[in-house]
Amino acid sequence: MRLTEHVEYLLRQGHKPKELLKLGFSKHIVTRVRRRLREEKTASQVRTGKLEDRVESDFQSTVKPPPEMTLLQSKLESLKSKFQQLENRVEALEALGVELEDIESHINGTPALGLKRRFKCDCGSSGYVALLIKCTKCGRETWWGWHPK
């Protein structure tokens, strides 16, 4: 079965053109088939009466699709569910990104962030640094940091 026939079948089944584009069908082919179907529909409505249109639509609904189309439909449904799962995961990752930004802003607000890595003394030692910490309630002072052993 040709690609245009697959696209035509899926469009007749009620699938939206955007769905077909997400599945990887070429925009050019989808647009061309959709335009041809629209032209056929308007031409048949002009040519024939509404009764003949009803008979044709009843005929189309009783015709069984070929086995390849059934297989293609099952694959389409599988891709739809996988796409939905992927969208859910992307939303979860975006929410996680916002949380990480909040954590990062809190960490960046801490005093002396990365001081151990950046500190280098005139004597040549690096990483040995301590800060005088004072309790703002009682006023007691203590040293916190990295001391040589």
Image (cartoon, grey):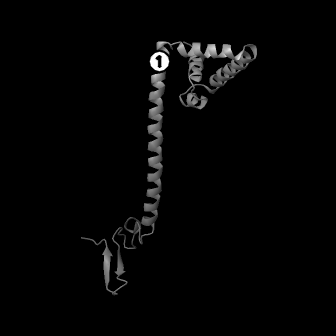
Q: Quadrant of residue 131?
A: bottom left
Q: In screen coordinates, is 82 left or right of 130? A: right
At numbered mark 1, what does the secondary structure look like: helix, strand or loop? helix
Above-or-below relation of 13 to 55? below
x then y, percent, for residue 121: 39, 72
Outermost residue to the right:
46
Above-or-below relation of 56 to 17? above
Q: Callout 1, which amino acid? A: Thr
Q: Nearer the viewer, residue 139 or 113?
A: 139
x then y, percent, for residue 13: 56, 22
Q: Nearer the viewer, residue 91 or 53?
A: 53
x then y, percent, for residue 68: 48, 15
Q: Quadrant of residue 12?
A: top right
Which residue: 56% across, 30% down? 19
Above-or-below relation of 68 to 88? above
Q: How many numbered discs, if any?
A: 1
